[in-house]
Amino acid sequence: MRLLLVEDDATLSSRLRADLEQTGFAVDVANNGIDATFMGESEPYDIAVLDLGLPGRPGLEVLRHWRESGNPLPVLILTARDAWHEKVDGFKAGADDYLGKPFHSPELIARLQALLRRGVARPHGPLRVAGLALDEDTQTVGILATDETFDLTGTEFRLLRYFMLHPGQVLSKSRLAEHIYDFDTERDSNVLEVYINRLRRKLGRDLIATRRGQGYVFGLDAG
């Protein structure tokens, strides 16, 4: 899943980016409200972490702009712990959740995962689709019928999670690349095919079907 991190504190931003990437997010960073506004409009992010105290344009104004333009991007706002009014203003502007500073990264990550689960109306626990159970904490996947468990690389995990959140849908190479890679990663379609073939070897070749000229379909309706 691709995440936009909007935070002007370079030390905090660097730490959060590392923690989020380790958890399986592809992360892009904006350190001011002007860049954040543009990036949130022009890139297909799955979720955003938005600090309110930003240079250039306040975070609350960024959020209002996104919502007024019809952008449904799930947003978790960061606020000073005692600024209760910022939380109220944030929810009124269209925030989905908030977290007060200082905070611990595991809580932030848990809240982000909860927002993503809410977006696809699935319960807590491993993501279960097409006979697979994906554990987001350990970045492993289990085959329910055989009790086999496989470790996943970071890219394999991001790719499989996106497939499992969109079963039965035709997903083009460009759409997959947009959601599993950040700005700094070269998006080579041939490399994407390599990772898809790795998943097929681990989980079964019929699980991810190729639609010639269209892309890929994952799950029970893949055939």
Image: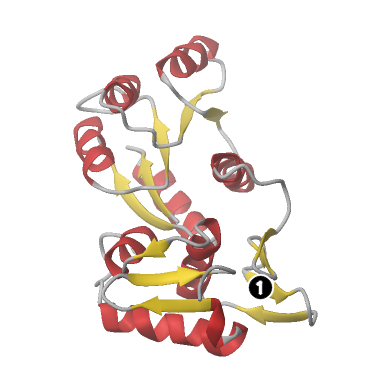
Name the element at disc 1.
strand
Residue shown at the point (59%, 47%) measured from the top left: 113
Whether 2 is drawn above or below 171: the answer is: above
Residue 144, given in percent of the width and then of the height, sits at: 76, 73
Task: Give left or right: position of 208 versus 55.
Answer: right
Q: Who is closer to the viewer here, 223 or 21?
A: 223
Q: Who is closer to the viewer here, 98 or 46?
A: 46
Q: Residue furthest top?
A: 85
Name the kind of residue labelled 1 in the image: Val
Task: Give left or right: position of 178 versus 169.
Answer: left
Residue 181, given in percent of the width and then of the height, sits at: 34, 64
Residue 23 picture quarter: bottom right
Residue 20, given in percent of the width and then of the height, sits at: 49, 55
Q: Count up the numbered dots.
A: 1
Residue shown at the point (48%, 66%) measured from the top left: 158
Whether 117 is drawn above or below 56: the answer is: below
Task: Give left or right: position of 53 versus 21.
Answer: left
Residue 136 picture quarter: bottom right
Kindly identify which residue carries mark 1. 141
Whether 145 is drawn above or below 14: the answer is: below
Bin the neighbour count of mark 1 within 10 Å (Cα to Cα): few under 14, some 14-19, many 20 and up.
Answer: many
Give the quarter of the figure containing the N terminus: bottom left
Q: Residue furthest bottom?
A: 201
Whether 133 is drawn above or below 149: the answer is: above
Residue 198, given in percent of the width and then of the height, sits at: 49, 86
Q: Who is closer to the viewer here, 213 or 30?
A: 213
- According to the image, what is the colour scheme of the structure? secondary structure
Residue shown at the point (55%, 12%) measured from the top left: 84
Q: Who is closer to the viewer here, 28 or 197?
A: 197
Residue shown at the point (47%, 30%) measured from the top left: 78
Residue 137 picture quarter: bottom right
